[in-house]
Image: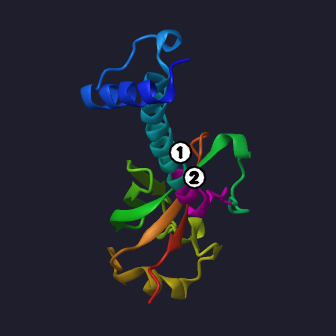
Amino acid sequence: MAPPATMKRSCRRVRMSGEICSDWLQCSPCEWATRTAMSSGFLRLFWGILLVHSTVAATAVPLQRLRPPEKLRCSRDHLTSFTGRVLAFKRDNNETFLRMRTDEDTTEAFTLRHPGKGSAAEWFLLGGKVFEPSDWKRIEIRRNKLHPRMRATVWACDDGATPVVDWQPPSE
């Protein structure tokens, strides 16, 4: 091993010139120390980023599985839900149409057919509870005009049954 004074001069030369040996096994002690210091700087940065990421991930709200409404007749493995902001809504005596932008950044459209029934209210929920005739004023300003920022969860079975819409009016 080189005497300490020689190592100091050699290390100063390595630091100033930026020379780093290409093979770990052939490095002088000061080249090894310089290379390790550079690597440990990278490792400190990597662990710092990992720590920040894990902290953010730990404070994020965990995703929870939604409980499907009881009025749905299909099994859970044939059921899906779409939650998001309602973009368009139109109802008449035979069908109700709604288009929504989901929280997963997709745009979905649904048509609830109810020939001769006058309204799709039997397939509506309001905050998970049975939709009452008085609830229309909680979702609509006037017929076919929803309150701004109206949200909903649409539950759809893959068997083609009429979807169920759970309205989520904005908090007042």
Q: Can you identify the residue that label 2 sits on?
A: 54
For the residues labelled 2 and 1, the Cα–Cα distance comes to 10 Å
Q: Residue 116 placed where, x, y %?
A: 49, 64
Give coordinates of residue 93: x percent, y percent.
Answer: 41, 67
* Residue appearing at x 43%, y 54% in the figure: 111
Is residue 9 found inside the magenta-colored segment of the image? no
Give the amino acid at mark 1.
Trp
Which structural element holds mark 2?
A: helix
Q: Going 53% across and 88% down the picture, which residue do you hit? A: 134
Q: Is residue 71 left or right of residue 87?
A: right
Which of the two labelled residues, at mark 2 and mark 1, occupies the earlier sequence position? 1
Query: Front-most of 70 and 23?
Result: 23
Say which residue label 1 marks: 47
> Which is more toward the observer, 23 or 144?
23
The three-letter amino acid code for the residue at tag 2 is Ser
Magenta residues (range): 53-66
Q: How is the image coloured?
A: rainbow
User: Residue 22's image quarter?
Assistant: top left
Q: Secondary structure at mark 1?
A: helix
Image x and y of residue 64, in percent: 65, 58
Instruction: Name the residue nearer the viewer: 27 or 142.
Output: 27
Q: Is residue 89 above or below residue 7?
A: below
